[in-house]
Image (tube, grey):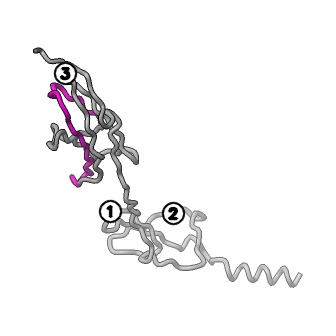
Amino acid sequence: MIKFLLLILLISIIAPVNASTTKIYLWRNEAGQLVYSDTPSPGAEEVKTNPGHVIESSSSIDIQLLDIQKEIVPEDYQIIINHPKNHDTIRDNTGSILISAMIQPRFKRGLKVQLILDGEAYQTPQNHTQFSLRNIDRGEHQIKMQVFNEEGKVIALSDPITFYMHRASIN
């Protein structure tokens, strides 16, 4: 019986007197992210809670020590031209060719792809990896592709591919 009374006395000392007296504050930090705390900050609003929905912590946490910034994981992009293959001969009397590539890791919104044909940018950067070329002259040609991020910085460059356009002569 004495052990039981000591246990109840110990629990009553450890347990908070009234959990509903705890206040919760909400505000936005410099990055515009929502921050919740039990310590008010300039411009913070008090969040109204129902009794019994507040859980007391046994230790105080200083939120200034918490890292609330999103971790930015650098993505190492690669672009690989998969058509045509290096040293392919394209036989088309109109000089047409479809060029396609794949980007790793997954292509995400905001990226742009630029085709480089014989050392010159072909048209404007676009948001996919397929280019349809028309009226390409007979002979040897080299293509590369580069990927730009949202800021316009080149983040990937393909290996050069050489292909040969074969068009029937009218002579």
> From mark 2 to mark 3, how far is it between C-alphas?
77 Å
The reply, left or right, for residue 130 in relation to residue 36 is left
Q: Is residue 140 above or below residue 68?
A: above
- Report if the CB atoms under discs 2 and 3 are less than 8 Å apart: no
Stretch of the chain drawn in magenta = 130-153
Q: Nearer the viewer, mark 2 or mark 3?
A: 3
Is 136 inside the magenta-drawn segment?
A: yes
Q: Quadrant of residue 57?
A: bottom right
Task: Mark 2: give few (<14), some (14-19) or many (20+) Cα within 10 Å.
Answer: few
Instruction: Evaluate if marks 3 and 1 touch, with contact meaning CB atoms under 8 Å apart.
Output: no
Question: Could you tell me residue 73's position as x and y percent?
Answer: 40, 60
- For the N terminus, the quadrant is bottom right
Instruction: State how far apart marks 2 and 1 are (Cα).
Output: 23 Å
Asked whether 134 or 73 is in front, the reply is 134
Q: Residues within 10 Å of mark 3 (few under 14, many from 20)?
A: some
Question: Distance between the Cα atoms at labels 3 and 1?
Answer: 60 Å
Report which residue position mark 3 lands on: 167
Q: For the view shown, which residue lies furthest in the left direction?
A: 171
Q: Amino acid at mark 1?
A: Gly
